Image: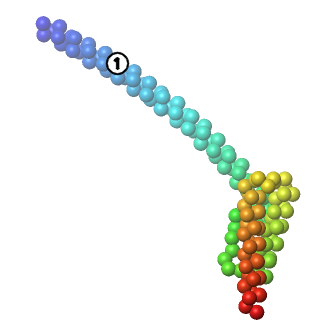
Amino acid sequence: MHKLSLMILVGTFFIGTANVAADDKATIRALELEVQELTKELNNVRMQYTTLRTRLENVRSILGGNDIVNAGNGQELDAQACSTSLSNLKQTQTKLKSLGYKDEHPDLRLVITNIKKRTLECAEIKEAKSSEG
């Protein structure tokens, strides 16, 4: 009887071990497939990053080094600096439009927003100057 119980116990152990091994192999295979998919996705993101970085550098070189984001973000300005800044923003807008950018493009929308902001700032500076004098 002991021999039979021992054989059943050993048989159950090997069957259980085989099932665990099969489960582990399936889990490992699933993880390997996920790593492959994530690697492909990472490579796609890297290619997109490279493409966007190249486009940004091209736009910056065309704009003569002016940074689109910072083009309208100055501190306090005097009347001349405000006028110059506004003129630069309008030139940037013209250059972007000449490149085929539509008004809906995020870079052009940012420049247009900065033009509106700078126009108001220049008007406030003029008003402050006229009320001082």
The residue beneath circle 1 is 18
Residue 106 x/y as whole percent:
72, 55
Residue 48 x/y as whole percent:
68, 46
- The crowding category of the residue bearing disc 1, from other C-alpha atoms within 10 Å (few below 14, some 14 to 19, many at least 20), is few
Q: Relative to the observer, which residue lies in front, 116 or 46?
A: 116
Asked if residue 88 is positioned above or below residue 41 in the image, the reply reads: below
Asked if residue 10 is positioned above or below residue 28 in the image, the reply reads: above
Q: State which quarter of the image contains the N terminus.
A: top left
Q: State which quarter of the image contains the C terminus.
A: bottom right
Residue 5 x/y as whole percent:
17, 11
Left or right relative to 1: residue 132: right
SS state under label 1: helix
User: Image quarter for residue 13?
Assistant: top left
Residue 122 x/y as whole percent:
76, 77
User: Image quarter for residue 70?
Assistant: bottom right
Residue found at x 76% / y 53%: 105
Left or right relative to 105: residue 35: left
Residue at the left extreme of this rendering: 1
Residue found at x 77% / y 82%: 126
Left or right relative to 75: residue 116: right
